């Protein structure tokens, strides 16, 4: 049986690959489990009845100026009301002119137990000197607290507590 010339075989292989990959490209990115139901339950069980207000602060490095100017700003999700999971998280790092944020210092801790979610989030996020973007974070219904932190090249640290209510408002 005669074989097709090499260029024709390459075109057939490329066409077959494109036909196989096209449906995958058209699908939205799959959600990933940022917080598991078991972790959410452990946090609810450990949470004090009188929760303090959310906090945001900048911590200068030892011996540094009292106000570093480094801050974490939440772009999404909106703090106006409940969100539906999976949702997008977008953070902006605001640093003084001429000072660079060190992306590798970004950390995420969950709830009162401060469960470290940093590596789990990193696998699905884009983290840069200007901020963090993560799509399709799956989180169980309820109120969740994420403690976010990042440092700049001078050692100043910014922290921000992000509270997200997922599901129906209660």
Image (cartoon, helix red, strand yellow):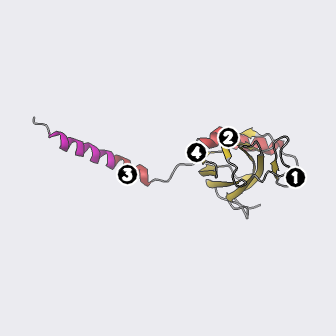
Question: Which residue lies most toward the top here?
Answer: 1
Q: Secondary structure at mark 2?
A: helix
Query: In front here: 33 or 102?
Result: 102
Question: Which residue lies most toward the bottom here?
Answer: 80
User: Is residue 54 found left or right of 19 in the rendered image?
Assistant: right
Q: For marks 1 and 2, give the one nearer the viewer.
A: 2
Q: Which residues are magenta?
A: 4-18
Question: Which residue lies most toward the right here?
Answer: 50
Q: Secondary structure at mark 3?
A: helix
| Comes first in the chain, label 2 or label 3 | 3
Q: In this orientation, does residue 116 appear?
A: yes
At horizontal 51% and vertical 50% (from top left) the residue drawn is: 29
- Quadrant of the snapshot with the N terminus: top left
Mark 2 Cα shell of 10 Å, populated few (<14), some (14-19), many (≥20): some
Mark 1 Cα shell of 10 Å, populated few (<14), some (14-19), many (≥20): few
Reading the image, the residue beneath label 2 is 118
Disc 3 to disc 4, C-alpha distance: 22 Å
Reading the image, the residue beneath label 4 is 124
| Comes first in the chain, label 1 or label 4 | 1
Residue 164 percent coordinates (x, y): 73, 55
User: Is residue 147 found left or right of 31 in the rendered image?
Assistant: right
| Comes first in the chain, label 1 or label 2 | 1
Query: In the rendered view, would you say 1 is above or below 103?
Result: above
- Quadrant of the snapshot with the C terminus: bottom right
Q: Secondary structure at mark 4?
A: loop
| Comes first in the chain, label 3 or label 4 | 3
Query: In front here: 114 or 33?
Result: 114
- Does 114 lie within the magenta span? no
Reading the image, the residue beneath label 1 is 52
């Amino acid at each position: 049986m005669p074989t097709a010339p090499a260029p024709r075989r390459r075109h057939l292989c490329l066409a077959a690959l494109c036909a196989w990959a096209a449906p995958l490209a058209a699908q939205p990115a799959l959600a990933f489990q940022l917080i598991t139901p078991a972790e959410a339950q452990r946090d609810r069980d450990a949470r004090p009845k009188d929760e303090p207000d959310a906090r945001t602060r900048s911590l200068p490095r030892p011996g540094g100026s009292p106000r570093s100017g480094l801050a974490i700003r939440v772009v999404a999700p909106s703090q106006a009301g409940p969100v539906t999971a999976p949702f997008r998280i977008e953070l902006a790092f605001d640093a003084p002119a001429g000072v660079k944020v060190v992306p590798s210092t970004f950390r995420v801790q969950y709830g009162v137990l401060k469960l470290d979610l940093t590596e789990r989030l990193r696998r699905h996020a884009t983290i840069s000197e200007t901020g963090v973007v993560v799509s399709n974070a799956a989180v169980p219904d309820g109120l969740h607290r994420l403690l976010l932190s990042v440092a700049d090249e001078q050692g100043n640290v910014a922290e921000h507590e992000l509270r997200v209510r997922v599901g129906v408002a209660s």
